């Protein structure tokens, strides 16, 4: 038997079923008209933002990394809750524009911005997080042609990393950002050529559950930002400190101690060097804001036995939940939080493998998991599905198409 990960708080049981926003999941499926279905909870998004605001110093803003969940309704809901938006493509820019988000609240990162993307961002007034000297030169040339001073920050590749990070974004040779030693020269050049100087973006890692690791990384980021600002010789308008806060996915995972992180950051911010006295500070968060607010629902379409093993075959799978299948960066596959949603109030009584509908043995949602007995027609819930689910999975694989998505 393999245990499943911890189900996030905030979900209820109504008449024996998993309930989201006070309604049974079968009702949400009926309203959507089909499975598979992602359901995102407004209440859980609001609660997470309230927790962050209570823990972080007032001076530190929160930016939403759109790549975590670019569903239009989610973007629109987050607009009044967060201070800014971080995008990674012209497509995400168009989504933000459709939600009527002020482009001056948007920053654009990514190591391979095409000229047409740079042009769209510069024309709109978006801040470019410049990833190289070459990108900076292209942005300046496009700005000159448009008659617009591009708004540019420099993304820094620091020499340090966030310890315990599931995905390290700094330290050593990286396709992301400009090596810290080269940042001052690039920043001075951009300013001299007429760019609107917007500061620095320093992102060291993601999906970290250790408060001590996050605290250490934030202290290092603030120290490096002060050193670079001194070397640049110009005020630092803004510092995007990155994020890194993770969520529990697997058995044994514990939530980040957010009050501890907030207390340490409050102390640090109260004692910043003069060069950062007027700098706008923000954290860039994606998964931490939306991950636990989402549930993936898929229906059991077959129950079968093979060599004494029970398989529940669903109409969903890795084409919507690549990470839950274990094929999105994990070395050893472990079970995400999951449940038989239509038997949510029942005790576990059998060991099953929950698999998807694709023609590959990689398509697994839960291995050897203890669950209540499920029959054809029951709904399976995969939790922590609000981030990097629908758009980070190969929905076109084998032609099954995307899942439905609703915000409730």
Image: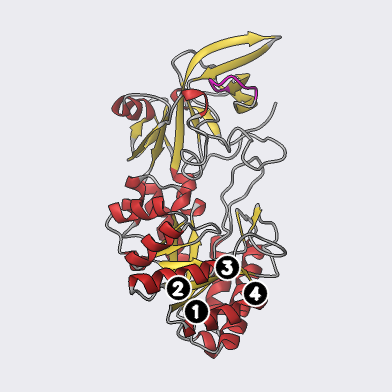
Can you say whether 171 is above or below 367 in the image?
Answer: below
**Distance from Cα at disc 4 to Cα at disc 2:** 21 Å
Any mark on residue 381, and which? none
First along the sequence among labels 1 and 2 = 2
First along the sequence among labels 3 and 4 = 3
Q: Residue at x 58, y 56 (%)?
A: 256
> Is label 4 in contact with label 1 (beta carbons under 8 Å)?
no
* In front of the other: 337 or 357: 357
Q: Where residue 125 sits in the image (x, y, percent)? A: 34, 68
* Residue 82, visible in the rendered structure: no
- Which part of the image, by quadrant, shows the C terminus? top left
* Residue 357, visible in the rendered structure: yes
**Distance from Cα at disc 1 to Cα at disc 2:** 8 Å
Any mark on residue 140, and which? 2
**Distance from Cα at disc 1 to Cα at disc 3:** 12 Å
**Distance from Cα at disc 2 to Cα at disc 3:** 12 Å
Any mark on residue 190, and which? 1
In this rendering, the count of numbered labels is 4
Residue at image mark 3: 132
Residue 346 relative to residue 98: left or right: right
> Is label 3 in contact with label 4 (beta carbons under 8 Å)?
no
Mark toward the viewer: 3 or 4 = 3
Residue at image mark 4: 180
> Is label 1 in contact with label 2 (beta carbons under 8 Å)?
yes
- Which part of the image, by quadrant, shows the N terminus? top right
Q: Where residue 283 sits in the image (x, y, percent)? A: 49, 66
Tag 1 secondary structure:
helix
Q: Residue at x 52, y 17 (%)?
A: 374
Residue 333 relative to residue 85: left or right: right
């Amino acid at each position: 038997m393999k245990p499943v990960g911890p189900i996030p708080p905030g979900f209820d049981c109504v008449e024996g079923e998993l309930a989201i926003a006070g309604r049974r999941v079968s009702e949400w499926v009926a309203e959507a008209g089909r499975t598979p279905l992602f359901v995102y909870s407004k209440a859980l998004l609001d609660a997470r933002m309230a927790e962050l605001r209570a823990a972080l110093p007032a001076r530190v803003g929160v930016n939403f990394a759109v790549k975590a969940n670019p569903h239009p309704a989610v973007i629109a809901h987050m607009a009044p809750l967060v201070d800014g938006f971080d995008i990674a493509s012209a497509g995400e820019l168009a989504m933000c524009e459709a939600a009527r988000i002020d482009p001056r609240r948007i920053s654009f990162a990514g190591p391979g911005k095409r000229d047409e993307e740079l042009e769209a961002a510069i024309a709109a007034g978006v801040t470019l997080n410049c990833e190289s000297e070459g990108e900076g030169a292209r942005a300046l040339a496009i700005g000159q042609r448009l008659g617009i001073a591009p708004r540019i920050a420099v993304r820094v590749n620091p020499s340090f990393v966030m310890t315990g990070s599931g995905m390290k974004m700094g330290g050593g040779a990286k396709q992301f950002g400009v090596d810290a030693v080269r940042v001052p020269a690039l920043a001075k050049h951009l300013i001299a050529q007429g760019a609107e100087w917007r500061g620095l973006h320093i992102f060291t890692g993601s999906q970290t559950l250790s408060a001590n690791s996050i605290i250490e990384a934030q202290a290092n980021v603030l120290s490096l930002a002060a050193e670079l600002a001194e070397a640049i010789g110009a005020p630092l308008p803004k510092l995007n400190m990155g994020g890194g806060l993770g969520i529990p996915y697997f058995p044994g995972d514990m939530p980040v101690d957010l009050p501890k992180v907030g207390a340490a950051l409050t102390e640090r911010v109260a004692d910043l060097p003069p060069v950062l006295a007027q700098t706008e500070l923000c954290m860039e968060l994606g998964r931490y804001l939306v991950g636990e607010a989402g549930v993936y629902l898929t229906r059991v379409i077959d129950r079968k036995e093979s060599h004494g093993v029970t398989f529940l075959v669903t109409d969903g799978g890795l084409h919507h939940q690549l990470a839950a299948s274990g094929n999105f960066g994990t070395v050893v596959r472990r079970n995400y939080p999951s449940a038989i949603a239509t038997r949510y109030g029942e005790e576990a009584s059998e060991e099953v493998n929950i698999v998807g509908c694709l023609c590959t043995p990689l398509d697994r949602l839960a291995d050897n998991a203890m669950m209540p007995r499920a029959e054809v027609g029951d709904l399976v819930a995969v939790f922590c599905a609000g981030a990097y689910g629908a758009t980070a999975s190969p929905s076109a694989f084998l032609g099954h198409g995307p899942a439905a998505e609703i915000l409730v």
